[in-house]
Image (cartoon, grey):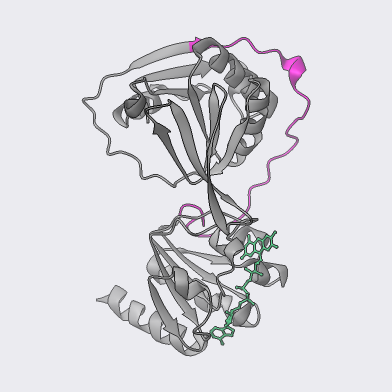
């Protein structure tokens, strides 16, 4: 986008994260890295990060601000846009720049993921929150040159209105759902919590993670952290295997970035088959057992 607009690509890195990250940002495309530092940025605290981001934007006057829609980004982006007196393009799946007008064009899901709207912002800076992992990072090029600018910020602790009292780490074995390159998800058609053990088995053989539809989560079969979809996690694995999931638009909103979807469902008319690259129409019990056996043989070879 910066190239299309003939502008510089700058990145703001918050907290003292060390020179390696700045250098790798340059190797992966940044022209300039603002290293935004303050002793108060050691841990994420929304009011402090927000104040630092606001200062950075006001002093550097970017034409476009892109923020990753991570948990932290979700907190910062709308407030930052408000403080800058502009709107926000939320939850973007794709962003591009119109070289003729200099406008940011952002694709974002609307109507519960049933349609994609292209929005443009008519104020500057144009702020967009982009779903993480929808883009493949550039191959690092160690010969790229860029500038690292030290950007100390003076933050006042009195602006902090919420405090982290405790951080509770969720115990999870194996690969995290959001990071997995292979995900096996189960839905209501599994009929109960027990079959998830078989999904775990297949996921383990493939080195992947297990997910679920909201129906399976709402039934209490698996924890909420398994949920993929509009109100769950957004995943972009290379391979997404869905088992007894109908493919409701709200589920697809969280997995449409998957490179290949494989669906197992007994209903040939299920929506998931419209989205899947490969599909097996049949009873999951028979298909999953055969699939797991074949994968086991292939893995052992
Ligand atoms: C505001 C809102 C937000 C939502 N957010 C989410 C979200 O984040 N994630 C999400 O998943 N949903 C979400 N939903 C719910 C969504 O609309 C669907 O209800 C849900 O995804 C359905 O889950 P499912 O596919 O497991 O169940 P169902 O739609 O009931 O589908 C079950 C499937 O299993 C198949 N099946 C049954 N038995 C077998 C068998 N023996 N072998 C093979 N196949 C079989 C059936 O043919 C069927 O297709 C949301 C809804 C709303 C309104």
Q: Position of residue 108 (x, y in %)?
A: 54, 46
Magenta span: helix, strand or loop, mainly? loop
Residue 177 highlighted magenta (yes or no): yes
Instruction: Answer yes or no: is residue 199 visible.
Output: yes
User: x and y percent of residue 212 in the render?
Assistant: 58, 67
Position of 217 relative to 39 (above/below): below
Q: Tally the marks.
A: 0
* Residue most extreme to the front: 100
- Give the quadrant of the C terminus: bottom left
Residue 253 found in image quarter: bottom right
Do we see residue 201 in this rendering? Answer: no
Name the residue located 68 percent from the left edge and 46 percent from the top edge.
168
Instruction: Please identify the residue farthest to the left as the structure is shown.
Output: 143
User: Residue drawn 75% across and 18% down?
Assistant: 159
In front of the other: 246 or 300: 246
**Image height check: is 146 above or below 139?**
above
The residue range painted magenta reads: 151-179
Q: Quadrant of residue 73?
A: top right
Residue 203, quarter of the rendered image:
bottom left
| Quarter of the displayed picture in which ligand 1 can be seen | bottom right
Horizontal and vertical percent position of residue 291: 39, 82
Q: In front here: 173 or 280?
A: 280
**In the image, what residue occupies the spot 51% across and 17% down?**
36
What percent of the width, then of the height, locates residue 213?
61, 68
* Location of the N terminus (image quadrant): top left
């Amino acid at each position: 986008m910066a190239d299309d607009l003939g502008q510089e690509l700058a990145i703001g890195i918050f907290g003292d994260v060390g020179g390696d990250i700045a250098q790798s940002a340059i190797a992966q495309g940044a022209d300039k890295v603002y290293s935004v530092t303050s002793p108060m940025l050691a841990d994420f605290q929304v009011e402090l990060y927000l104040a630092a981001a606001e200062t950075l934007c006001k002093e550097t006057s970017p034409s476009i601000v892109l923020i990753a829609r991570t948990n932290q980004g979700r907190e910062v982006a709308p407030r930052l846009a408000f403080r800058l007196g502009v709107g926000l393009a939320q939850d973007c799946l794709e962003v591009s720049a119109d070289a003729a007008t200099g406008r940011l064009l952002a694709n974002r899901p609307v109507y519960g993921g049933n349609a994609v709207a292209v929005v443009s912002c008519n104020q500057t800076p144009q702020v967009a929150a982009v779903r993480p992992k929808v883009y493949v990072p550039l191959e690092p090029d160690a010969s790229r040159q860029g500038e690292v600018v030290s950007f100390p910020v003076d933050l006042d602790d009195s602006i902090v209105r919420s405090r982290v009292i405790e951080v509770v780490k969720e115990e999870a074995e194996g690969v995290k759902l959001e990071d997995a390159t292979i995900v096996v998800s189960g839905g209501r058609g599994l009929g109960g919590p027990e079959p998830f053990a078989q999904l775990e088995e297949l996921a383990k053989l493939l080195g992947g993670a297990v997910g679920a539809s909201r129906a399976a989560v709402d039934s209490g079969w698996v924890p909420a952290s398994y949920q993929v979809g509009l109100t769950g996690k957004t995943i972009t694995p290379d391979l997404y295997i869905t088992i007894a999931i109908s493919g409701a638009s709200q589920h697809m909103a969280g997995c449409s970035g998957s490179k290949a979807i494989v669906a197992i469902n007994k209903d040939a008319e299920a929506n998931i088959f419209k989205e899947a690259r490969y599909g097996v129409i049949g009873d999951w019990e028979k298909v999953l057992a055969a699939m797991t056996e074949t994968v086991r043989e292939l893995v052992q070879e």
